[in-house]
């Protein structure tokens, strides 16, 4: 729980400092020393005419002080951070907050009143109050931030990029914070100080993002499958590299995850199921903590592994109505095993991996949901020639590979392991097709996530298929197991949203 407090403090610091930077640029710059006002008198007149704009502009910076203090307390309470430097961070933060917040409180009350009735008195007041927040308070925050650097570097939640960034960042911040305290004859212009602060705070945002990412990855390392599997876009251009950063970011995942999810709809076609009956122990290795495998057969020695690939039909928000015809129709492939939550009783599937042939939907699914570990293939297609052909080519990316060449066949007669699990093909379909609830777990949040998904497939529409099935990714899971395939001409895909249950382990 204490580690979670540190994570929340870092994410909150990143978000609040970002809001404060925007507030400075949008609200305060015409009213601040070294800002964009045409003259000093115009600057004071702006404060007098827009007092609540001035106060609103300072509010995020007051919240920054709260966020810095919360971070300092969280660092002291985090066992894996060095205790001495963490305590120093707390002391320095308290020493910074006192003059900084006193100055801001007086500035937005008495200062605003002076600006409205006596500009000369306001200038005298500002000369006295400005060094408290921009000088003494800012120096305290800067030395506390140097303590952040020491703590995170010594704890190993660090990177070479952070080292390279820290030198110009803290150097710039020290220049900006010391300047208001210099004798007037040596003091640089207000424009210089404002510019140095602007550059410093932009670099600080990058620094906070990078160090937060390191801390979050400490508890959320890359895994072999599922939501935390490493994403690699097949492209090699700058946008593809940017997509890699976004998709693999734990910080962006934490920021976007609380956003509401809306129902998604698609008129899907050419749904091709490829099913493998595999050893339960092999499938159990893929099950996330808190869920259990749906075991099959008299002794529970088997499990079903399936990958199904289909073509979307205008995949988009359900609320778009007829406008959904403007959206794309990419090919998607879902790779899954069957699981249940032993405490809630909910049954569904766990996605080992997914891929969709569009970058933006893949990023959205990856950042906004817990159960859809999307990747992007280099190429994906479903065609009807002499046979039904399905191709998923990962290229140099992290999507699974697949090559199918199938044709219709008679309804299979089950023997051996298949007969041990289901008496016939109809019973198999009754188990395989309705499993339309995707489930995953978030141990750090102590919850099970459920994505409710339906495809609306009648069992009688499931046409058995036979032919060539090639996939290194499938072989890595299913080994030499023989696939059982079927094809559905069309269905109605509907994602209704994500639900959560308490995780009990």
Image (tube, grey):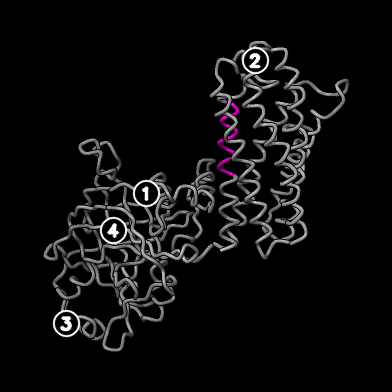
Pinpoint residue 408: horizontal percent, then vertical percent: 17, 65
Q: Quadrant of the N terminus?
A: bottom right
Residue reaching furthest to the bottom: 299
Above-or-below relation of 294 to 308? below
Q: Nearer the viewer, residue 56 or 2?
A: 56
Tell me what residue is drawn at x 62 percent, y 21 percent: 112
The mark found on residue 44 in the picture is 2
Sort mark 4 into few (<14), some (14-19) or many (20+) by Cα contacts within 10 Å. Answer: some
Q: Quadrant of residue 314?
A: top left
In the rendered structure, which disc, 1 or 3, sits on the residue that comes first in sequence?
1
Query: Going by the image, does 408 lie left or right of 215?
Result: left
Observer-nearest residue: 273 or 45? 45
Circles 2 and 4: CB atoms closer than 8 Å: no
Q: CA distance from mark 1 to mark 3?
A: 37 Å
* Residue 16 magenta-highlighted: yes
Instruction: Say which quarter of the image contains residue 468.
Output: bottom left
Q: Element at badge 3? A: loop
Alpha carbon separation for disc pair 2 and 4: 57 Å
Left or right position of 49 against 201: left
Earlier in the chain: of badge 3 and badge 2, it is 2
Q: Which residue is mark 1?
A: 357
Q: Which one is closest to the eye, mark 3 or mark 2? A: 2
Q: Residues within 10 Å of mark 3 (few under 14, many from 20)?
A: few
In the image, residue 273 above or below residue 422: above
- Labels 1, 2: front one: 2
Per the image, the residue denoted by label 4 is 452
């Amino acid at each position: 729980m204490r580690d979670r407090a540190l994570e929340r403090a870092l994410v909150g610091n990143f978000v609040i400092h970002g809001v404060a930077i925007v507030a400075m640029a949008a609200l305060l710059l015409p009213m601040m020393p070294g800002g964009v006002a045409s003259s000093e008198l115009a600057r004071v007149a702006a404060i007098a005419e827009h007092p609540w704009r001035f106060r609103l502009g300072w509010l995020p910076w007051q919240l920054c002080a709260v966020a810095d203090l919360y971070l300092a307390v969280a660092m002291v309470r985090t066992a894996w951070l060095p205790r001495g430097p963490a305590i120093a961070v707390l002391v320095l933060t308290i020493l910074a907050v006192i003059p900084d917040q006193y100055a801001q409180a007086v500035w937005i009350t008495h200062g605003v009143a002076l600006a409205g009735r006596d500009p000369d008195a306001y200038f005298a007041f500002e000369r006295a109050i400005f060094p408290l927040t921009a000088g003494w308070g800012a120096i305290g925050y800067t030395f506390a931030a140097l303590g952040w650097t020491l703590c995170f570097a010594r704890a190993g939640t660090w990177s070479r990029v952070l080292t390279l960034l820290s030198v110009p960042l803290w150097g710039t911040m020290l220049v900006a914070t010391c300047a208001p305290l210099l004798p007037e004859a040596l003091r640089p212009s207000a424009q210089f100080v404002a510019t140095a602060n602007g550059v410093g705070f932009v670099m600080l945002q990058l620094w906070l993002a990078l160090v937060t990412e390191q801390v979050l990855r400490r508890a959320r390392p890359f895994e072999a499958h599922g939501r935390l599997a490493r994403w690699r876009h097949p492209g090699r251009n700058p946008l593809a590299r940017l997509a890699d950063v976004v998709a693999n970011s734990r910080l962006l995942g934490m920021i976007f995850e609380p956003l509401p999810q809306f129902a998604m709809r698609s008129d899907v076609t050419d749904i091709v199921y490829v099913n493998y009956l595999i050893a339960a122990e092999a499938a159990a290795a893929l099950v996330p903590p808190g869920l259990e495998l749906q075991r099959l057969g008299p002794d529970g020695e088997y499990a079903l592994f399936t990958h199904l690939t289909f073509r979307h039909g205008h995949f988009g928000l359900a609320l778009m109505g007829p406008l959904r015809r403007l959206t794309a129709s990419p090919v998607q492939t879902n790779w899954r095993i069957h699981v249940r939550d032993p405490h809630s009783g909910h049954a569904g599937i766990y996605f080992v991996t997914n891929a969709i042939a569009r970058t933006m939907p893949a990023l959205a699914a990856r950042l906004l949901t817990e159960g859809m570990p999307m990747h992007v293939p280099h190429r994906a297609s479903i065609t009807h020639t002499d046979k039904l052909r399905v191709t998923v080519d990962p290229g140099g990316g992290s999507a699974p590979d697949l090559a199918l060449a199938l044709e219709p066949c008679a309804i299979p007669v089950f023997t051996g392991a298949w007969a041990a699990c289901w008496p016939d093909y109809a019973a198999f379909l009754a188990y395989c097709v309705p499993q339309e609830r995707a489930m995953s777990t978030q141990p750090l949040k102590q919850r099970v996530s459920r994505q409710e998904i339906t495809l609306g497939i009648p069992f009688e529409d499931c046409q058995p298929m036979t032919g060539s099935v090639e996939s290194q990714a499938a072989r890595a899971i299913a080994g030499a197991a023989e696939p059982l395939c079927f094809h559905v001409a069309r269905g109605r895909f509907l994602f209704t949203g994500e639900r959560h249950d308490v995780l009990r382990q």
